[in-house]
Image (cartoon, rainbow, N blue to C red):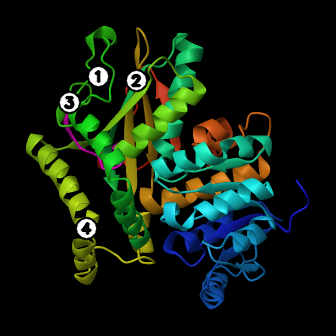
């Protein structure tokens, strides 16, 4: 790679997540890291930079000195000009199926590493089919899905697969995930992406919904120790002793982890299923129907616009307060099945998973691409576990994220565990 002006470019710096990513890098990147910020509106970016500089005048990475790059996400020439100036791009501009393609293409052709927080797995698959061979030839790493969707499930399964190989000497066949506690907000950008995703990927996602609802996404073979893994979405979990209902991210996480399982050879027919804990069977049914109802409202533009008008959902650029995000947490329980053994994992975070944790995940992914690159990295267009797995896992653990595995059920290590148990 030729000498570049910047180590990391934050693309989408004026958005709710993008501005906080700029702040995260200013406070956590190594001294001397060259960070640039970019988007399509210079005055808005300058305002964000000035606000953050006033908030953090002594930040290790000077906010005032961050250069600004301007471009249109749908203009190929702009994206090439921007990608050619930096070693890594961290993009928060979604929906990615609308605003991400030209930037990804430019990064592949300009030999620039890239990471984002999309949950649009079908779009990532499309980019993989079209550009993966060229990315491999150019030794470029395009790492999508670096947010709350899908880092906990993706790296959690990587951790379990490695444990199964090293300590049990057996392949990993299935992982059952359960969100046993969560508190977090949602931004307008996320809701806009959800509406777009439902609109253009309804058929493919509906297949995933039906599989999750029926339990057909899990193995049909006899599990070890009589454990039942082929369960409908609303069910009673004998291990946790709690009812389970539909979890909105289960389809995306299942698609991403199965893809990683194939690429990294976790085990024959590896599968992943994910649900959310409920207080009782009635709450499990209610939350399942609630997610379906919200999806239906977001699918149609008329009802989606009505929700915006009534302020029932935030508009793009809006999101939860800093105070609310600091009060957030999540805890993901993982039950893993090899050929003869059952063992457990725990992934948890002590702040809002959709924003504070996501910003941490994306920031550390960008820093990992910029400074940790070695022979373990896999070039191409892949989920984080495949492209930069263990290096990123080490970084997140060093930042206080819990990724643990053991033969017995593991409590969350954060204070949030008290809220969960």
Tally of numbered tags: 4
User: Residue lying farthest front?
Assistant: 130
Residue 246 lies in the magenta stretch: yes
**Where is residue 123 drawn, in percent x and y?**
50, 52
Q: Name the residue: 47% across, 43% down.
A: 152
Position above or below: 177 against 72: above
- The mark that comes first in sequence, 3 or 4, is 3
Q: Name the residue under label 3.
A: 241
Graded by Cα atoms within 10 Å as few (under 14), some (14 to 19) or many (20 or more), the crowding at tag 4 reads: some
Residue 55 or residue 102, whichever sits in front: 102
Q: In which quarter of the image is the C terminus?
A: top left
Q: Name the residue under label 4.
A: 300
Name the element at disc 1.
Answer: loop
- The mark that comes first in sequence, 4 or 2, is 2
Query: In the rendered structure, are the residues bearing label 1 and label 2 in contact, judged by CB atoms less than 8 Å apart?
Result: yes
- The mark that comes first in sequence, 1 or 3, is 1
- The mark that comes first in sequence, 1 or 4, is 1
Q: Residue 174 carries which label?
A: 2
What's the CA distance linking mark 1 and mark 4? 35 Å
Is residue 38 something one can see in this rendering? yes
- The mark that comes first in sequence, 3 or 2, is 2
What's the CA distance linking mark 3 and mark 4? 38 Å
Name the element at disc 4.
Answer: loop
Q: Name the residue: 65% across, 83% down.
A: 49
Q: Name the residue under label 1.
A: 229
């Amino acid at each position: 790679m030729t000498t570049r002006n910047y180590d990391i470019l934050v693309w989408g710096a004026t958005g709710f997540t993008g501005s906080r990513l700029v702040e995260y890098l200013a406070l956590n990147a190594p001294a001397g890291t060259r960070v640039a910020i970019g988007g399509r509106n210079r005055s808005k970016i300058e305002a964000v930079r000035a606000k953050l500089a006033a908030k953090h005048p002594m930040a290790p990475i000077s906010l005032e000195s961050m250069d600004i790059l301007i471009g249109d996400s749908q203009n190929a020439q702009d994206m090439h000009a921007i990608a050619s100036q930096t070693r890594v791009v961290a993009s928060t501009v979604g929906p990615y199926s609308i605003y991400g393609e030209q930037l990804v293409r430019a990064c592949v052709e300009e030999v620039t590493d890239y990471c984002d927080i999309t949950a649009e797995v079908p779009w990532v698959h499309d980019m993989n089919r079209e550009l993966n061979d060229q990315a491999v030839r150019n030794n470029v790493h395009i790492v999508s899905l670096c947010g709350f969707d899908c880092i906990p499930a993706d790296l959690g399964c990587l951790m379990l697969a490695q444990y199964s190989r090293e300590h049990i000497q057996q392949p990993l066949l299935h992982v059952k995930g359960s969100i046993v506690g969560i508190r977090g907000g949602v931004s307008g950008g996320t809701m806009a992406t959800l509406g777009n995703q439902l609109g253009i990927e309804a058929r493919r996602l509906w297949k995933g919904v039906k599989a999750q609802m029926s339990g057909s996404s899990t193995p049909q073979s006899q599990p070890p120790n009589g454990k039942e893994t082929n369960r409908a979405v609303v069910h009673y979990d004998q291990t946790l002793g709690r009812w389970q209902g539909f979890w909105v991210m289960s389809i995306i996480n299942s698609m991403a982890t199965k893809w990683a399982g194939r690429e990294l050879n976790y085990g024959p027919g590896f599968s992943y299923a994910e649900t959310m804990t409920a207080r009782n069977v009635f709450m499990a049914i209610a939350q399942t129907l609630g997610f379906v109802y919200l999806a239906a409202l977001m699918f149609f533009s008329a009802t989606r616009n009505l929700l915006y008008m009534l302020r029932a959902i935030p508009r793009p650029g809006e999101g939860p307060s800093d105070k609310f995000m600091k009060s957030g947490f999540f805890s993901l329980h993982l039950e893993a099945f090899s050929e003869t053994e059952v063992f457990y994992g725990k992934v948890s975070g002590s702040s809002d998973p959709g924003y504070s944790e996501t910003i941490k995940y994306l920031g550390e992914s960008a820093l990992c691409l910029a400074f940790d690159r070695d022979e373990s990295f896999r070039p191409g267009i892949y989920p984080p576990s495949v492209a930069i797995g263990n290096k990123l896992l080490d970084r997140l653990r060093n930042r206080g994220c819990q990724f643990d595995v053991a033969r017995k059920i593991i409590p969350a290590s954060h204070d949030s565990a008290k809220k969960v148990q």
